[in-house]
Amino acid sequence: MNRRIAAATLFLMPGLCNPQAVSTATPDGRVWIQRSNTFTQKVLYLEMKYAPEEGTRNGLDQFDTDVSVPTLANMFAENKEAALLAEEFEAQIKREKDPNVAEDLQILVHNERLSIRTDNYTENHRVRFRNPTSWVFSGLKMLLDDQMPPERRQAAVVRLKKYAGLVPGYRPLATAMMERTESKWPSLAWSTHHAANWKHSWREMRPL
């Protein structure tokens, strides 16, 4: 999930380590910004729950040993949680008295709904290419970067084992990706068959 929150919200990251520890006001006294940030944090945490590599990328060490599991079931689970979060925000909008917070909540709701529709459309109309090699490389590179503290680099071993399916409860990443792609073969074959028939019919109708 990167698609859920724009890069401008990344200034929230330092406070994400403890989402309960939110100060009552920003330095310039705009209390509404901190209130709005508490809702944005919920969206960011949902994204990182299913894409923990993003948590590592943004400096949150509690995600260092976790890995994404790109199964269809996880996509549905994430979107279900996103829909519930959108409903929570919509309920908050109805009772929100600060127009600035209400506006931010409307943006968050729109992003969540759009993200869910995008996932559903992509799943129904496209066969995505998923490269396990680049996925693993990216997930490990961020932990092995020279600027990463030595104590955090150790997490790369655990993450690699999970990618390889060597940790109980985890299947090889490549297997999960292969199964996700193969599940699309029937629809892909149908689309190819009808596309070929359409092309043949078009040639027959084309004037000489």
Image (cartoon, rainbow, N blue to C red):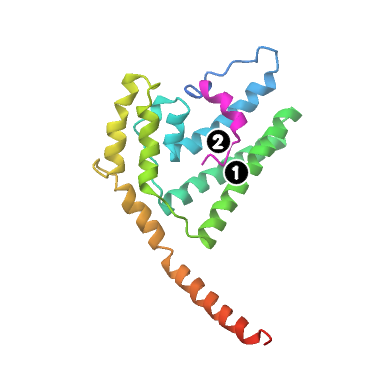
Q: Position of residue 6 (x, y in %)?
A: 61, 35
Q: Quadrant of the C terminus?
A: bottom right
Q: CA distance from mark 1 to mark 2?
A: 8 Å
Q: Residue at x 73, y 28 (%)?
A: 100
Q: What is the magenta range?
A: 1-14
Q: Residue furthest front?
A: 208
The image's mark for residue 43 is 2
Does residue 127 appear in the picture of this structure? yes
Element type at mark 2: helix
Report how many numbered discs are placed on residues in the image.
2
Marks 1,2: beta carbons within 8 A: yes
Residue for badge 1: 112
Q: Residue at x 29, y 40 (%)?
A: 162
Instruction: Classify residue 14 as left or right of residue 138.
Output: right
Q: Residue at x 47, y 49 (%)?
A: 75
Q: Position of residue 184 (x, y in %)?
A: 44, 64
The residue type indicated by label 2 comes to Val
Q: Is residue 2 above or below residue 26?
A: below
Element type at mark 1: helix
